[in-house]
Image (cartoon, helix red, strand yellow):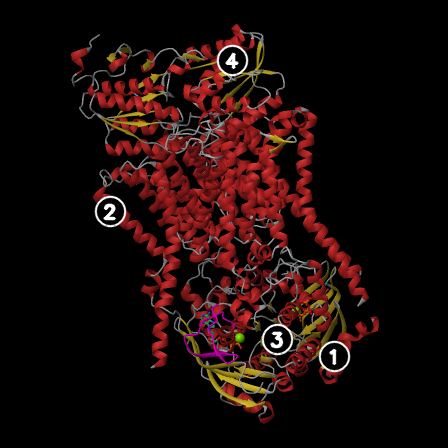
Amino acid sequence: ADTGPASAPTGGAGGGSDNLAVTFLPKNLGNPYFDTSAKGGKAAVEEFKGTFNQVGPAQASPDAQVSYINTATQQGVGALVVSANDPKAICDALNQARDNGVKVVTFDSDTDASCRDLFVNQASADGIAKAQVDLIADQIGDSGEIAILSAAANATNQNAWIDKMKALLKSDHPNISLVDVVYGNDDDQTSFDKTAALLQSHPKLKGIISPTTVGIAAAARYLSTSSYKGKVALTGLGTPNQMREYVKDGTVTAFALWNPEDLGYLSAFAAKALITGEITGKEGDTFTAGKLGKYTVGANGTVLLGDPFVFDKDNIDKFDF
Amino acid sequence: MTTIAIRTSSVTKTLSALGRARELGILLAVVLVVIAATVKNQAFLFSHDGWRDLLLTPSILLLVAVGQAIVIITRNVDLSVGSVVGLTAYLTGRLFSDVHGIPIVLVVVAAVALGAVLGLINGALVAFANVPSMVITLGTLYAFRGIDVVWAGSNRVNASDLPSSFLSLGTGQLLSIPILTIVAVVVLIAAGWYMRNARSGREHYAIGSDPAAAHLYGLRVTRRVLFAFVLSGALAGLAGVFYAARYGTVDSQAGSGWELQAVGAAVIGGVAIMGGVGTVWGAALGAVLLMTINRALPVLGIPDFWQGAVVGVLIIGAIVLDRVLAVRQKRRLIEARDDS
Amino acid sequence: MGTTPVLELHDVQKSFGAVVALRAGTISVNGGSIHALVGENGAGKSTLVKIVAGLYQRDGGTFRFQGEDVDFTSTAQSKAAGVAVIYQEPTLFPDLSVTENIFMGRQPVNRFGRIDRKAMRREVERLFTRLDVVIDPDRPAEGLSIADQQVIEIAKAVSLDASLLIMDEPTAALSGKEVDRLFAIARSLRDEGRALIFISHRFDEVFSLCDTVTVMRDGAYVGTSAIADTEPDELVRQMVGRTITELFPKQPARIGEALLEVDGLSRAGVFHDIGFTVRSGEIVGLSGLVGAGRSEVVRAVFGVDPYDEGMVRVSGKNVPAGDPAAAMRAGIALVPEDRRKQGLVTESSVAHNITLAIRRRLARFGIITAAMENRAAKEWASRLEVKTHALDTVAATLSGGNQQKVVLAKWLATGPRVLIIDEPTRGIDVGTKSEVHRLLSQLAGQGMAVLMISSELPEVLGMADRILVMREGRITADIPREQATSENVMYAATHATEQQK
Amino acid sequence: MTTTTAPLRAVRDFTHPLWRRVVATRESAIVALLVIVAVVASVTVRGFSQPITLTYLLLDVTPILLIALPMTLVMITGEIDLSVGSMVGLSSVVTGALVQAHWPFGIAAIMALLVGVLGGAVNGLLVTVVGLPSLAVTIGTLALFRGVAVGTLGTTAVTDFPDQWTALAQARISGTTIPYVMIPFLILLVVFAVLLHFTPFGRGIYAVGLSKDAARFSGVNVERTKLILFILTGVVSAFAGIFYTLRFGSARGDNATGLELQVIAAVVLGGVSVFGGRGKLYGVVAAVLLIGALSSALRLANVTSDVINIITGILLVVSVVAASVLAWAQKKRRRPHVTASTAA
Ligand SMILES: Nc1ncnc2c1ncn2[C@@H]1O[C@H](COP(=O)(O)OP(=O)(O)OP(=O)(O)O)[C@@H](O)[C@H]1O
Ligand SMILES: Nc1ncnc2c1ncn2[C@@H]1O[C@H](COP(=O)(O)OP(=O)(O)OP(=O)(O)O)[C@@H](O)[C@H]1O
Ligand SMILES: [Mg+2]
Ligand SMILES: [Mg+2]
């Protein structure tokens, strides 16, 4: 309802504060996807003159994240922006942080709704599932065997998308059969080897969907040097920099992703809005996210970034992340 | 004297047969796995990619396992190899992306040299400070990986950063045998020859068999142990180059967890963890078995989630079988002695 | 040769922390002579040897080799200079073949640096023929008996072709036949003009082999004399500072009921149908050539080795097979032949070693403390006069003889009814030896049954009430004390072997 | 020897006085380092001195603390158990799967402990009866236990644990900042410390680690000793798995991946020799706390995890190298002194 000047610290339901220390906690460090989102986050925090910090474990595991959440609690930061390695495992730690006055925003991968103030969703699960299913159906002529190369078996977002994709395939693409789901654990080498195994165990395979940036890059790399290049279609979620070569050499026709930089940027502004008390995270709250404009909190305390974007030969050179 | 001579020669034969049988058993296991997977799916062996991957996939671990075997034979262990592979693989990628047109040979030399230096650090700490290698290399496992993560940060080397001539090394073939495999096998033959036929090679066995005796004997224990670690590091460095060539993408976690795979490969291949016993051939076969099992399981239709469990059972099965065969042979030897 | 001695040490010192192992080591050895070095356990003989070998660096004193001042900092250097050493403890590589053990680091190689296995094999065969050794050159050293290990050490040292050969108790594990062979080799080396140092606690050997003798006491030089000018009693006095009246103080004991009964014991490939009885108050000697399988039998009786058939009883009660703890409960104690591997936890303290076998008995309500252990350990260490600085001294740093005392103390502390003792005085000096003998005799007198394995015939003849003789895994004779002579014991030990040939 | 003429020689109990035996040890160095880190961090790192730090620190290190107890004993016998991290995961999954199948939580936890006994027995039997090297065996069971855990739950994570239990896993002893889980830990600590340092069984453990043969010849049942210790490691790991599940309220197949190396690093830092025969429990406990306190302080100072890993690694290396350099220096220093006194 109210925007602009009202964003000054007010005694909203959450109680406003001017502690604009925002800590980003990605699933793990050393992941280019999160590096890009942190870049957006940092830009946003600098815009509203807060202090930005990014911490995280070397390998994606919930227990290591809990230690960092606890640390943030001890430090008394203003807000914590988290991509959860497990929807439940970090819940108690997040709630303790909130009890100590830390605002909690999840992005990319959500926790239970009860453990955070707001979830910034990169794209709705439906939207992501539909984009990928449409891409693969288009590339293999709407019939034949396909497989999915996912990240970790427990990744919340991945599993939600896979479930939706299965449902979509069943209802809209009866001639496509999903023959296997394998897990590359967001590890380059594992994903690479799993792709090789997939192609061998399913000689009639026509397409692979890899809804993870690590997976799709590894799969593309394997395909591009194998005899399956151009014969087995590959799509999924990837970053333009990693996929550029394979799009140009014809291994991959098109793939999708949102802009992770925008995701980080939006999350940081959402955190700020919570800190200042501008919003509390209830449905209908609105806030302005700098250059991205105005956003409204939807059901379950969720803010939606937008629809996924499809990259192909024609537009890929316009992006650098 | 004549009766003794006869007994000697028969004992000798059985003993050397036993020695060979250790590696033979593992070779048999590899063959069985390949046959089973091929029966299930012809493409496992009889397709272009299947054949190539069969030879290519184990090549990288093979290098690391050979180095590891030599270290273990001296009654030490190198747990830092995974981190060394990671660091050198990243170095390889960075050299290509930062120095345009750098010759491949130079990069290989640089990566192997870095590996050797890291190995030297391990070796010097172990040999001069005289502390258990397991502790030292557990420490450097963390430290080297940490340096890798600090250096690489969130950057990763992508295939597009690497020259295509280098990438084609990763998949290229000579007479249908992958180039990387050829290199790995050459290294293996050289190491095998050295460990069996060179004086200094045999000294590694002596040192591992009884370090105190080796000291009394006047063997150059420090130098040999140092050499073993440097070699292990250098081979891990070469494996790092292979890694970059084969996988094209290198992030800061490349090669993590390989230490246990390499130790596992050596132990499965009959290298005694207490040193003094085993061959690099065995370790190489162990590496081939491990990697081939990993690739064969999906083909055999083992669901993704259960593959780890099956690998575990197979590792245990392989070492139990090896042990049972050894015990049987020993009993037969004793019985033979009784009859003579 | 006669002018410059091959080896000259003068006032050499060596300390380990607070322990002064060598106060004033002095020795001068000429070429073409065999020089005996004698002294009590812990006198510093092995320390002196290790300094010559370059294993230890001296803290002071002069060290001359071939007339030149030298400073060996590693055994490789001394080896290169022409010093060959047979250490007191065999130092073989268990996983390597006998051949490789002999040639490690100096294998014959061809032009490409490839080890010439055939040539190596030929060398070994020549060496073994010269030494009259029958050991499979291709078998691993693992599992060789101590005697065979010692034989290989000798072969190794002889093959080095050194100008100075030092033998630190090379005969401790050997029986008569092998000793004779060794002596023949030693004499031939002497006749080639080489210098030899021979360390032994057996005076008969010293007197039959050597031409000069140096005596040490408490880490210091006492004196050197020509063998022809001295006699055993004189040496003993120099060594111990007093005379030993009786080497085998055997007291007659009342022989009572059968305590240990072994019946039909067999283990494929090792021993067959072993049956014997040891009575209370009786000392039974178990004799035979090295390799006859005596140690294996007693290990099976004690339960550390398995056996295929047969029965072991103590006081008529069965002792379960393969369970040393049960054997201990039944009242058996075994002092094993290899004290460094089997008898002692060498890296552990004297106190822990002495109390290891009685740890359960010492505990109160399942709890054991250092104070309890020290109390028990102190009592036994004092009774056996273990020469140690403190109870927490690591056993490995004790001299060989003192280590043996610790093992004895450990087993006597269990208060056994049946004491099995394998080579009780191996590597022990005369003084201690007679004490051990007195102790055995006294224990038998108190009603203990003692089974004693010994490769030293005088010891068996002097101490045993009855002598069992083993040959190739079988008992071939049971000779009462009155009838025992070295001839009939040796006959039983070798007879069938002669027949077969 | 009552007949000997020589007087009974009184043997001293110890070479060095008590203070030297206590102070000049590796264990004391670790304890001292722990104190130094705690003091320095309290002064220099903002947020470290607040009471909540202790709670989080203890909760973080609890699984390592727990497993380090039996692991110390196993490593003193000269063996090693690399499967502990996987056992934590397996126990977590067993608890979760049974709770999901509507078993009461208590029963599910007991079943998980039984699985721990079973897993430990598998390790122990393969090592003792079949006679395989424990490093190889437990690399195998590391894969096996993890594989069964991941296979059983697949993609799912069980999260519906009774609230009173999950709350208990985090709860603090009233009036303090010490978590409740420290009570079972302290009980286990006392049990293991007594077992290792004050029982005949413990004496046997050291003997086995220093010389298997000599231990056997002294009536120590080497096989049974090792089997018992592997089973204890299995069951304590399973207990740690239950705690882990409750603390995070989530049972997953990949829980506690890689924990084995952390445990072993701590045990080794605490002064246990990987060759067996040496080590004290208090050193290990101090080492776990040292690593915990150090990472906690560094995290608070916004040092990233990779740097923390580097520091942990270097600490491990330096701690062993320093000990050996110190011993060497001591030897160097002593030598001229002796020469001087003998020359005089
Ligand atoms: N490495 C060491 N550390 C500490 N003390 C030692 C060490 N080596 C030897 N000693 C001590 O030095 C003294 C001399 O020992 P040494 O082994 O030279 O005696 P020995 O004359 O060879 O006796 P034996 O006849 O029993 O073999 C002994 O008191 C022994 O305890
Ligand atoms: N070179 C060999 N080849 C085959 N078997 C051997 C060899 N040497 C010994 N043995 C076996 O081992 C047994 C001998 O072991 P060992 O030498 O310990 O006997 P021992 O009589 O106790 O000798 P010692 O007095 O040295 O203890 C014999 O029964 C024999 O069968
Ligand atoms: Mg000596
Ligand atoms: Mg014997």
- Give the residues in magenta: C53-73
Q: Does the magenta stretch include residue C362?
A: no
Assign the magenta stretch its main secondary structure.
loop
Residue D170, position as x, y percentages in the image = 34, 34
Mark 3 or mark 1, which is nearer to you? Answer: 3
Mark 3 to mark 1: distance in Å?
A: 20 Å
Circle 4 sits in a helix, a strand or a loop, which is it?
A: helix
Q: Are discs 1 and 4 located on one and the same chain?
A: no
With respect to residue D52, does A197 lie above or below?
above
Mark found first going from the N terminus, 3 or 1: 3
The three-letter amino acid code for the residue at tag 2 is Val
Residue A166's disc number? 4
Mark 1 or mark 4, which is nearer to you? Answer: 4
Q: Does the magenta stretch include residue C55?
A: yes
Which residue is the site of mark 3? Answer: C172
Residue D339 falls in image quadrant? bottom left
Mark 2 to mark 1: distance in Å?
A: 78 Å
The three-letter amino acid code for the residue at tag 4 is Lys
Mark 4 to mark 3: distance in Å?
A: 81 Å
Read off the chain for label 2.
Answer: D
Q: Residue at left 78%, top 65%?
A: B4
* Whether the residue under disc 2 has CB within 8 Å of ligand 1: no
Residue C489's disc number? 1
Is C491 in front, or is C306? C491
Read off the chain for label 3.
Answer: C
Which residue is the site of mark 2? Answer: D40
Q: Check disc 1: other Cα within 10 Å, few if <14, some if 14-19, many if 20+.
A: many
